[in-house]
Every structure is written in structure tokens, then in C-alpha cells.
Image (tube, rainbow, N blue to C red):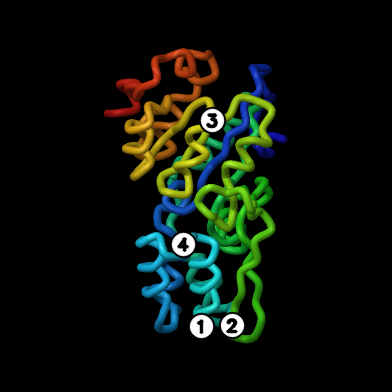
Amino acid sequence: MPHPHCPGQITVPHWTILCDFDGTIALDDTTDTLLERFGRPGWEALESDWRAGRINSHDCMAGQVALLDMSRDELDAHLDARALDAAFGEFVDSAHVHGMHLVVVSDGLDYAIRRILARTGFESLPIVANHLRQTDDRQWALQFPHADKACRIGSGTCKCARGRAAHERTLLIGDGASDFCVAETTDFVFAKGKLIEHCRAKSIPHAAVAGFAEALALLPALISGKLVAAPRAAVALPKAASA
């Protein structure tokens, strides 16, 4: 359903948007900022093991969250200070006007995502993420309701499974390694950060964007079919968006 202040929807071919959260909607990686602020010793070693390929993302995240030492009040205060892409709300409104279904798909923390999105009035968006659970006053654990044993990269949330489940055209918006696999199965990608080079290397149809203002400017071309029909290479931004 469209956001309450959206005008009526416009009938167009159906699209599902799979949208990453950390580094995409939120400007920083929320989990990283929590670990830097509240992590007990040992979380950096887990990070190093993951980057070296000795453990997968699922095991890294589980171990790191178990090392968080914070109260719920401290957690909430920290989350309330996280910055969002200023154009995200306008992008969601426009996507809903055009009948597009947007799902936040993240290998991050569901509680953090909902808390942060509540500031923009979009906390009711569908969210697929790892489940953060408080086990004691200052202790936390992570559950993985969206894990998939067949996940090629061992993520806590298998984004590829969400891509396979979509029965419509699929747009991915993301920025990092957790988006690499699903990018290869979607119809088009709005790419930030490390995902740009991955799309280039794999010849994945994409447009490099700095944020949601540029993504918003590209929506009309995506909906009209101009981007999907383009060659498997990067698509230039409209001049107004790149100014």
C-alpha cells in the first residue's frame, strides 16, 4: 500500500524493489557503529576472520552480537543518532505511487532498522533481516529467521532467496558484499560503493548512484523500460541528477 500522504497509484508493470539498509538507507553500517561503541574485546578478531574467509557472515554476526554490552536505553539512544539518506522518504513515496513493492532486505538487525525507519514514518515497510533479541539487561543474541542452507556466501539473511521468491521484475538497491550474489539474479541494480565495481566486473545491468536522490531521478526510465532494455553496462545518470 502507498504511504498515507501519497497520491493515487499509477498502473505500471509490477516491480519489486529489494533495498539494502546499512550503507544504503542508513549512511553508516549500523552494526559496525554499535560494535565500535559497545563491543567487548574479540569482535575485531571475528571481523578479521570473516574478511579472510575463515568464517561466514552468519557466524561472524552471531559472535559479534553476543559481544555487545549495552542496555536497551543505550541502544535506542545510539540508533536515534544514526543518519539516513535524506531522499529516502521521497523515493519510497514515488515508488509506491507507481505501484512498486519495496522490501528492506538486510543482513543487519531488524530492531535497529525499525527503530531508525520510525523517524521517517516508514517503519511499516516489510523488513527482512536478522532478529535481535535481548537476553539479559546488557546481553544480546542474534537469530536468523531468513537464513538459507543453500546460501552461497553464508549470510544470516539470504538475499538471493528473496530474489528467487519475487515473481515480478526486480530492482536491487545496495552497496556491499551482501548484495553481490542477488545482484546477479535481478533485472536491474542501483549500485553504491563496492557493488558498483562488482556490477562492472560481472556485466550486471546497473546504474551507479550516490544516493536516493539519483535513484529517484532514474525511476521514470526504469519504469518505462529504458534501463532494463539497455546494454549490460552502466547507465549514465540524467544530467539533473548528476549536477
Give the Cα distance between marks 2 and 1.
6 Å
Q: Residue at x 36, y 38 (%)?
A: 198
Q: Secondary structure at mark 3?
A: loop
Where is mark 4, residue-wise?
30
Q: Amino acid at mark 2?
A: Gln
The mark lying in front, picked from 3 and 2, is 3
Looking at the image, residue 89 lies above or below residue 15: below
Q: Secondary structure at mark 4?
A: helix
Task: Assess disc 2: are there few (<14), some (14-19) or many (≥20) residues with their C-alpha within 10 Å of its C-alpha.
Answer: some
Give the Cα distance between marks 4 and 3.
25 Å
The quadrant where residue 93 appears: top right
Q: Amino acid at mark 1?
A: Asp
Do the numbered discs 1 and 4 sit on residues whose CB atoms are within 8 Å?
Answer: no
Residue found at the far bottom of this picture: 137
Give the Cα distance between marks 1 and 4.
15 Å
Task: Assess disc 4: are there few (<14), some (14-19) or many (≥20) residues with their C-alpha within 10 Å of its C-alpha.
Answer: many
Q: Amino acid at mark 4?
A: Thr
Q: Secondary structure at mark 2?
A: strand
Where is mark 2, residue-wise?
139
Where is mark 1, residue-wise?
69
Q: Residue at x 40, y 57 (%)?
A: 28
Residue found at the far right of this picture: 1
